[in-house]
Amino acid sequence: MQATMTAIAGLQSSEAAQAGSALLRAEHVLQQVIGTLDNTLAAGTTLADGAHPLSECDLPTLVKLAVHDIAADARARITVEWRTGTRTVQLHPALMRLSLRNLLNNALAYSPPQAPVLLRVDESDEPLALHLEVVDQGPGIPQELRPRLFEKGSRGSNARQHPGVGLGLFIVQAVARLHQGSIEALPAPGGGTIMRLTLPQGLVD
């Protein structure tokens, strides 16, 4: 990728703009393919085998990696808001990274073009838990979709505009349950949706 960008920098401005745009589109498609493959693998094997001990994880690093998983042309729309100084949490890092990627990609896909997406990191003391919220500015979740929102293969009526096989939220819920936590879809003030992932802490001695 770095070599390609260096070569693009040597082109005339108009040629460089076209080449850069094409490269970003290609990266976006590649990230979507990788995401679909990761979700399929997680649903078919990783989550199915049932052996997933939690471990101590550096939270800022996990969040940074999850945001970096998003295609570069959409990543700039994401803002991370920290409401906690907590650094170390008990998680399954790889599965939580995949879950955050799914939530962020959903929020970006179903929001208006260029609309910002917020990832809010918070915690509570009683009960002791980590809260991860992804807030979008989309049209909200259709009422008819809500009862099956987290089912495998479930997609909304406008999902044809967006690639995927309907595994993203199914995996998020499965990972939340693995952590003895929960995922909720709440209406955001002023429109949009808050996807709130609650992950109990203090489960590992």
Image: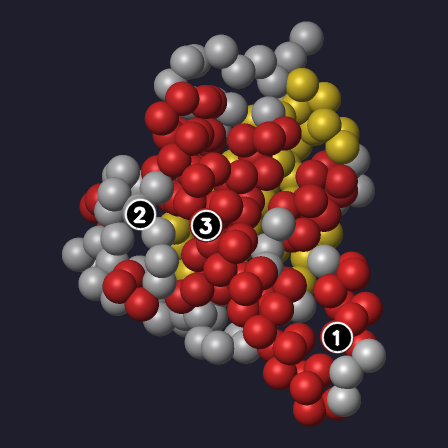
Percent x, y for residue 80?
Answer: 68, 57
In space, the residues marked 2 and 3 are separated at their CA atoms by 11 Å
Residue 165 numbered mark, or none = 2
128 and 118: which is toward the camera: 118
- Mark 3 surroundings within 10 Å by alpha-carbon count, few (fewer than 14), some (14 through 19), many (20 or more): some
Horizontal side, residue 66 vs residue 38: left or right: right
In space, the residues marked 1 and 3 are separated at their CA atoms by 24 Å
- Residue underneath mark 3: 33
Percent x, y for residue 17?
Answer: 67, 84
Residue at (50, 46) in percent of width and height: 34
In the rendered view, tell whether residue 120 sits above or below residue 190: above
Looking at this rendering, what residue extends furthest in the top direction? Answer: 205
Residue at (72, 47) in percent of width and height: 64
Number of on-image labels:
3
Percent x, y for residue 2?
Answer: 78, 59
In space, the residues marked 1 and 2 are separated at their CA atoms by 34 Å
Q: Which comes sooner in the sequence, label 1 or label 2? A: 1
Amino acid type assigned to the residue bearing label 3 in the image = Val
Quadrant in the rendering for residue 14: bottom right
In the rendered view, tell whether residue 68 sits above or below residue 19: above
Amino acid type assigned to the residue bearing label 1 in the image = Ile
- Residue underneath mark 1: 8
